Image (cartoon, helix red, strand yellow):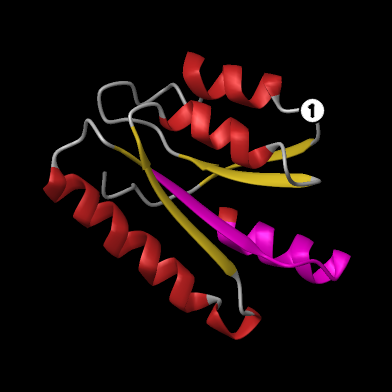
Amino acid sequence: MALSVAVALAKEAHATLTLLHVYDSHHHPERREREAAEFHDLVQEVRSMDPVVLELVAPDPVAILFGECVKYDAVVLGAHSHESRPGILVGPTLESLVRSLPKTVVLTRSLTPSLH
C-alpha cells in the first residue's frame, strides 16, 4: 500500500521517487536477508520510474529514518501490526517518528502481513 501511495504522489508532483529501507543491525542476518528480499521485490515493481534506492544498516533505525526523512517534502511510511499486538498499528517508536517529522507524512497499513 505504501508503495502505491508513494508512486501516485511522486507522479502527481513530478518528483523523484526515493525508496528507503533501514535494516536494524541488531536483527539476525537471516531476518535482514528476508527484509532485503521483500524490499528488492518492491523496488522491481517500480523500476520503470527509476527510483533512488537507499538501503542502510544501523543500530538505531529510527534515528536514521528521521535523518533521511527530513530531507523530503513528503514521506510515505508503511506500517503493519505485529503478531503479538494485532490491535496496535502504531507503537510508541513509530508515533514518535511521525510526530517529529516537520513535513507531510502519510502512514499506510498493508492488508498482508510483513515478512519480518
Q: Is residue 63 or residue 47 the one in the foreground?
A: 63
Circle 1: residue type: Pro
The quarter of the displayed image where residue 22 is located: top left
Specify whether residue 98 is painted magenta.
no
Q: Residues within 10 Å of mark 1 (few under 14, many from 20)?
A: few
* Residue at (51, 26) in percent of width and height: 63
Horizontal side of 21 relative to 16 (left or right) equals left
Residue reaching furthest to the right: 13
Q: Position of residue 11 (x, y in %)?
A: 79, 71
* Residue at (39, 60) in percent of width and height: 39
Label 1 sits on a secondary structure element that is loop
The N terminus is located in which quarter? bottom right
Q: Position of residue 30 (x, y in %)?
A: 12, 49
The range drawn in magenta is 3-22
Horizontal side of 38 relative to 21 (left or right) equals left
Residue reaching furthest to the bottom: 48
Please indicate, yes or no, whether residue 78 appears anywhere in the rendered image. Answer: yes
* Residue at (52, 53) in percent of width and height: 20
Please indicate, yes or no, whether residue 1 appears anywhere in the rendered image. Answer: no
Q: Is residue 7 placed above or below 66 in the rendered structure?
A: below
Q: Is residue 93 placed above or below 31 in the rendered structure?
A: above
- Residue highlighted by disc 1: 102
Specify whether residue 16 is painted magenta.
yes
